[in-house]
Amino acid sequence: MNYKHAYHAGNFADVVKHILLVQLLNQLSQKNKPFYVLDAYGGRGLYSLASEEARKTGESKGGIQALMHADVEKAPAAVKDYVEGIKQARFTYDKKVYPGSPWWIAHHIEKNPNGGVRGEAFEAKASEYDALNYQLHKLPIGIHHRNSFEGIAAVIPPKEKRGLIFLDPPYEQEHKDFTRLINLLVASYNKWPQGTYALWFPIKNIEAVELFYKKLKRTEMRRQLVCELNIYPNDIAVGLNGTGMLIINPPWQFDNHAREIVRFLQPIFKVADAPDLTPDSATNVRWLVGE
């Protein structure tokens, strides 16, 4: 595996992804019933923005650093929760730390000790698993050296009956990865159709993304929501034009909350020298299937 997330930790895509995760967790906790949450691609758990990798790309400047300097007084609740979480992580560990998805799940469980939330994280790459296990082993989340394609099938349906499967893969070969992930989602959905599935994906090759959407529409999965935030137009070749998340079976009114979140965040992450985007192309939250 050539991809190393340490180069991209805390960029705008990470921030959007984790705020949407916070929103999902908050809404799932609104019901007074236990639920299960799995991060299928755990990564290292914690990343240093002072690392050589992070400093080399400087991507966090347009992401977490931009948000932490923004006025969030009128921000959606999930954005405020996220900012408070960042402050807590930096107080606990280091002022240059950026927490990954497993930390956000564990943080939610710590905030809701009687909420009946059970969390787990998988990581297939040995070095990343070792770091994840070392950094988060004291937190309320199970850490497993496991591949998502095998592991998800083994843990669903969970005993809690409710839950979230969160997928944040590296996408080293977009076309192949999109197809493999659709197959994984379909197999998981067939085994546990009541579950909520959230899949992050990059927006950099619009043809690959559009084909991804077409293939998803052909599946039997119902209630497919897509959330997009772009900082560059699709016809400009840059490393990452935008960030997207597919949610299967989102909680009630999650689409409205997601729309508020991406509309609030997009101006904060706007690139100064990038061509202007139309409101519809800057952010887009829409149903691929169902509603």
Image (spheres, rainbow, N blue to C red):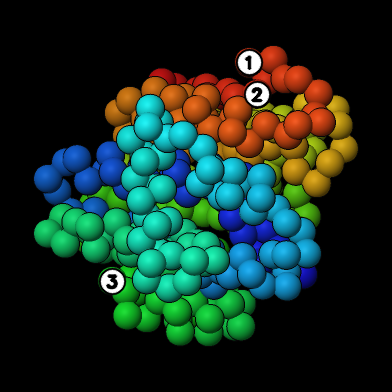
Question: Do labels 1 and 3 touch, CB within 8 Å?
Answer: no
Number of labels in the image equals 3
Residue 137 coordinates in the image, percent (x, y): 37, 81
Which residue is pictured at 75% across the width and 43% down the height? 240
Residue closer to the observer: 72 or 258: 72
**Label 1: element kind:** helix
Tell me the crowding category of disc 2: few under 14, some 14 to 19, or many 20 or more residues within 10 angstroms, Cα based: many
**Of the residues shown, which amino acid type is indicated by label 3?**
Pro
Which quadrant is the C terminus positioned in? top left
Instruction: Report crowding for label 3: few under 14, some 14 to 19, many 20 or more residues within 10 A (C-alpha).
Output: many
Question: Which mark identifies residue 254?
Answer: none
Residue at the spot of label 1: 279
Q: Is residue 273 visible?
A: yes
In the picture, residue 133 is in which quadrant?
A: bottom left
Q: Is residue 141 left or right of residue 12?
A: left
Dot 1 amino acid type: Pro
What's under tag 2, amino acid-wise? Ala
Residue 57 on image: x %, y %: 76, 59
Which residue is depicted at the point 19% across and 56% down?
112
**Disc 3 from disc 2: Cα separation:** 37 Å
Q: Which residue is mark 3?
A: 140
| Left or right: 206 in relation to 37 | right
Would you say the residues marked 2 and 1 are in contact, meaning their CB atoms lie under 8 Å apart?
yes
Instruction: Name the residue at 30% across, 28% down.
Output: 252
